[in-house]
Every structure is written in structure tokens, then in C-alpha cells.
Image (tube, helix red, strand yellow):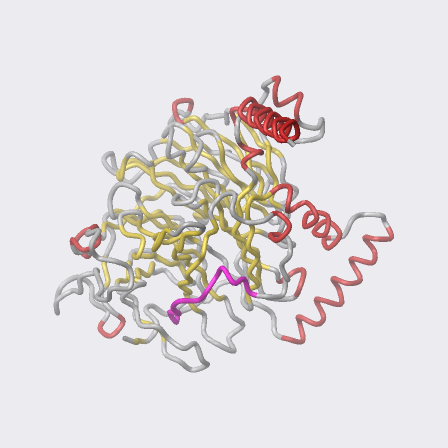
Amino acid sequence: MESPQPQQQQQQGPKKRGRKPKPKEEKEQQQQQSASKMKEGKKAHQPSVDEKYTQWKSLVPVLYDWLANHNLVWPSLSCRWGPQLEQATYKNRQRLYLSEQTDGSVPNTLVIANCEVVKPRVAAAEHISQFNEEARSPFVKKYKTIIHPGEVNRIRELPQSSRIVATHTDSPDVLIWDVEAQPNRHAVLGATHSRPDLILTGHQDNAEFALAMCPTEPYVLSGGKDKSVVLWSIQDHITTMATDPTKSPGSGGSIIKQNKPGEGNDKAADGPSLGPRGVFCGHEDTVEDVTFCPSSAQEFCSVGDDSCLILWDARVGTGPTVKVEKAHNADLHCVDWNPHDDNLILTGSADHTVRMFDRRNLTSNGIGSPIYKFEGHKAAVLCVQWSPDKSSVFGSSAEDGLLNIWDYDKVGKKVERASRSPSAPAGLFFQHAGHRDKVVDFHWNASDPWTAVSVSDDCDTTGGGGTLQIWRMSDLIYRPEEEVLAELEKFKSHVISCATKA
């Protein structure tokens, strides 16, 4: 099914995070500038991006249990895991959601890929670092293409049924897709857009990045340039097949109900639309990110360019429940709520830091200090996410090209002070340095412990394209020290026993 674009995109200035790839002439000019900068850097004896990358790649067999590198022709500003499709002896097959942010020569797309996730302790150490940066990975195969109305800035999947996906573009609307029921399209210049299964209306200006799906109910949350946070319930638009385990991915038929003529706010040929359940006002600038409380569909929080962290409760009203006026010293880009402990909230900012707040310490008069500031990035933090595998662990990615993995349980402990170098930031225990440009998004895999997907927009280093990496750090890094030492002793005993028998 095809249609015109849902809502006319409003002309805006350049986005702060991510941009369209540059035309060829600009790319060449940018590459020349980049080359001259690298020469200057070498003169000053500063390691270049490529030198740092080469050093990282040499350590891959030691640091990682598995890693796959996938070159992207067009950058993707978001990456998300979908449902697991199949489990086999040595690997699992799983959906992966990406996008293609093009320069206009071909349409922007939402990409559904199939990913082969190699199981722990299967990949040979000497093989995982033998990849070509310019090649596509054999572990990632494109399954379906949806022609998206405008570039895809953010992708979020519905936890109750991860075949339902929400996307943000440069418009006030949120687009809802049943990716399994959507037809596969060929992205060529002039092709009409795919027709969204549902269009969520309610913003008065473009909503580009702030997007979340509720873990407990089929609710969608969004923030935008209109300084508002908008909440929708799509419960009435999803059939019981959404939670039917017998309905396998790819079995066809949309699980999103279509409005009957005269129902809802139909936009004629654009597809069915749905108005908001609530519009929440309290920010004084663009809302950059939103997230739900893991235990309540009525509670959520948001961050924005006004440096504020705001907590909301839909049961109380449309005004802030708690507003932290100066959560950071600059714009806030991202927020995440701990799924294991709903008192803890993470925020990331253009001030290069990640801060952790305890909502029990926050008051309605705007006073609230973070319980810890994590300082390990050298540029704006773009994404934060708690690990599903350990309650005290989280990741943060930034414009410095790094994805840092932290454990707040280790902050200030004697064990940590003894094991880490004096210059290492407190709580930092792993650094994924496989990207050579800003890491715009990452997502922990809930189906495969300690496995993550991350994506970088490589416009600044290579003039275009992006890099997708799927990786799992060695379990020797995150397992308890005493457990690792005990295993090492067993290994030593085994070697001695074999030597004695020989």
C-alpha cells in the first residue's frame, strides 16, 4: 500500500544531531579538509582517528567474545533489536531495525534486517578481528525495505509486540508501522512512500528525536520542538494477535486495526490517524528525549534543551510533577529509567557528562542534585541505556566516537581503585572504541545477554555512510573477579593433570 507523505514537513534549521549526507562535491572537499587536519594532528604528535582505531582493532581478540562489523552505504540514526526468530546450536537469528538517511538521490528508508547473533564462546578469537571496514557483514542481511516519508531520526519497538515500530521524522507526526505486514519496497528515485499503519497526531511543531514505547501498556510517548510531551494509547488499534504467540513474524496480515470511515481523525489516503491521550507542558525549549517509568504507564520523564529533567504523572494532570531546573550545564540529549530499580534515572548532555538521579531525592521546587556524575566522554553524550543484564550497569555513547560501559556499584570501591588505572573515570569498566565517528545510537539485546548493537554516522571521517557493529565483550571483563580466578585455577589444574599423564 502506498500513499503521499502523512503531514507536510515544516521547514526548520539544521538538526543538532545527525544530518543528511553531503553531495559528492562537498564530500570530496570535506575529505581533503579531514586529511589536512590529520596531518596537523600528526605534527602535534596526537594520535589520529585511524591510529586509535588500529590500536583498538589489534585488541579485539582479547576484549570481545564476538564482533561483527557492517558497512552502511547511508548512515542510520537509530538501531533497535526486534523479535528473536530462531535459536540454533551456535547462533540465533533475530530481527534488527535500521534506517537509511539518504542525500535525496534515493528515498529515505526504514530497513528490517535479519541478524545472525553468534552465541557466547563460539567465535574463534583470531577470526573476529579479521573484517573489512568497507564490506557488509555476512551476519546482517536486509529482509525488507519500507520507503519512509522523510528521514528516520528515531526507531522504537513496542515491547508487547516488537513487530510494531514507531518512527520519528522531520514532521509533527509519529508514524506507527506493522513491519511484518508492510510490503517490501524497492527504493528508487520517485517511488511513492509506504503507507503507515497509523499516524499519531498532537504535536504543533516538528518532533524529531524524543520517542518511547511503554514496557507495560501499548502507550507511545513523544517530545518535540513545540516544547510539549505527548502521550497516546494505541491499545484500541492493536488486535489480540499482537500478543498471540502463535502469530509468527512474517505470517502476514497487519495486527493494527484500521479505522472505519468516519472514525478517528482520518487523513484520507494517508492512513488512519489518532489524537493524543494527553499533552504535557512544562519545558521551555525543544524536548530531546522521553522515557516511561518501567513499572507504570502513567509515569514518565523528559529532558530538553532547557537543561531540565521533568517527571510527569498522567493521573495527576498535564503539568510537571517534579522539575529539575538545572539537571546539567548544557542541553540534555537523552534519558533512561532503570528497569530494575525505578528510583534511578540517567541523563546525558552536551556538557559531556552522564548523571544519575534518584527520584526520591527530587523535590517539586526544582531542587535535586545527581547522586553521581560520570565523566568519561570528550564530547556531547547522545544516548544512555541501562543494561537488561545487571541492575547497576549502563552504556553511554557520544560524539567522541566512544561507547562507554559503566557500573555504578564499582564507584568508590577499593577493588575498583586497585584494578583500574589512576586516570580512568570512576565506574568505567569497558570502552567500545570500534567507531571512528559519533555513535548516534546503541541498543542492548534483551534476548542475548551482554550483546549490543551500535551505529555511527561517519559523515565527518569518511564523508558519508555509517558503521553498524554488533558486539559482545569478553565475559572475563564483567564476571566477578573471584569467579574468573576460580575458573583460571581449574584451567591450571587441568593443564597440570594433562602434563602429568603425558
> Which residue extends farthest front?
502
Residues rendered magenta in the picture: 136-147
* Residue 499 counted in the magenta span: no
Give the image quarter of residue 280: top left
**Vertical comparison of 316 with 415: above or below:** below
Say which residue appears at 62% left-offset and 29% top-offset. 501
Identify the image quadrant of the C terminus.
top right
Q: Position of residue 229 (x, y in %)?
A: 35, 47
Identify the image quadrant of the N terminus.
bottom left
> Which residue extends farthest bottom?
190
401 vs 260, left or right, is right
**Vertical comparison of 434 with 180: above or below:** above
> Which residue extends farthest top?
414
* Residue 138 counted in the magenta span: yes
Q: Position of residue 495 (x, y in %)?
A: 63, 30
Say which residue appears at 56% left-offset and 68% top-offset. 73
Note whether residue 53 is visible: yes
> Which residue extends farthest right?
43
Identify which residue, 126 or 14, lies in the foreground. Answer: 126
Identify which residue, 47 or 62, lies in the foreground. Answer: 62
410 vs 270, left or right, is right
Number of numbered labels in the structure image: 0
**Vertical comparison of 396 with 276: above or below:** above
Q: Position of residue 130 (x, y in %)?
A: 64, 56
Identify which residue, 457 or 118, lies in the foreground. Answer: 118
Identify which residue, 280 or 139, lies in the foreground. Answer: 139
Note whether residue 16 is visible: no
Prevailing SS of the magenta stretch: strand
Q: Position of residue 267 (x, y in %)?
A: 24, 69
